Image (tube, grey):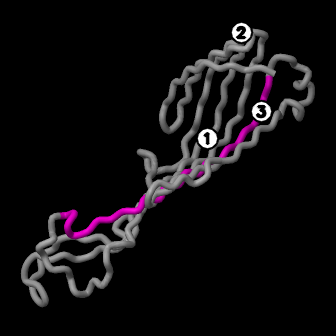
Amino acid sequence: YMPDIKLGDSKTGLWGIGLKHDVKQWIPGFKKVPVINVSLMYGFTKLHTNIGLSVTPEDINAQSLEVDPAYTGNWENQELNFIARSHTANLLISANLPVVCFYGGVGFISTKTNLALLGDYPYVTIGTGTPYSGPYVAAISDPVDMTIKNQDGGITKPRYNIGIRFKMAVITIHFDYTRANYNVFTAGLGISWR
């Protein structure tokens, strides 16, 4: 959880939840195998960002043009909203040995991202009659409202993961490769104690 952080007319927040359950206990005879662990996990994350905008006719070099008399606003209701939601579920298998842990997983990840440009925005257009017969400033409301999807048009993809972790006293080193919407290789160094 990250509470909303406000900076000027903008704010960003993040929250998520995850659950992991050891399923080895439900497989007859398998719970006696000392080294192997099998778990199911699920996680949800939501990131939201709202950015206050201020685009006026002066910002598009149209200050010398007349504004459409049908527009009675003042360009102050503009906002960019970005919301990303992600669900992931995996079957995780690991082999814990005294110094090294091998692990892997298979599952899915589903990501939905919305981008919306809300409010009234000025643009220059050409009139062909009354009241204008030349360029003037008009307003467009809520010009962008889109869902960002994967390259194939879907929002759900398989997810594969493999890794190794070395434990040396309180120091751990890990190497991890994940193949999903984006392929990621990570390495890390950690300190852990009990």
Q: Quadrant of residue 40?
A: top right
In the rendering, at what x and y percent does residue 67 appear?
19, 80
Residue 125's disc number: none
Choose mark 3 or mark 2, whichever is in front: 2
In the rendering, at what x and y percent does residue 74 appear?
31, 77
Q: Which circle's residue, 1 or 3, is located before the other in the chain?
A: 3
Q: Which residue is mark 2?
A: 168
Q: Which residue is mark 3?
A: 39
**Farthest residue toward the bottom?**
130
Please state which amino acid type lies under the numbered disc 2.
Met
Q: Which residue lies at the image location 56% right of the left edge and 29% below the top edge?
A: 178
Q: What is the crowding at mark 2: few (fewer than 14 residues within 10 Å), some, or many (at least 20)?
A: few
In the rendering, at what x and y percent does residue 140 appear?
29, 73
Quadrant of the snapshot with the C terminus: top right
Please state which amino acid type lies under the numbered disc 1.
Phe
Q: Which residue is mark 1?
A: 108
Please state which amino acid type lies under the numbered disc 3.
Ser
**Farthest residue toward the front?**
8
Local SS, label 1: strand
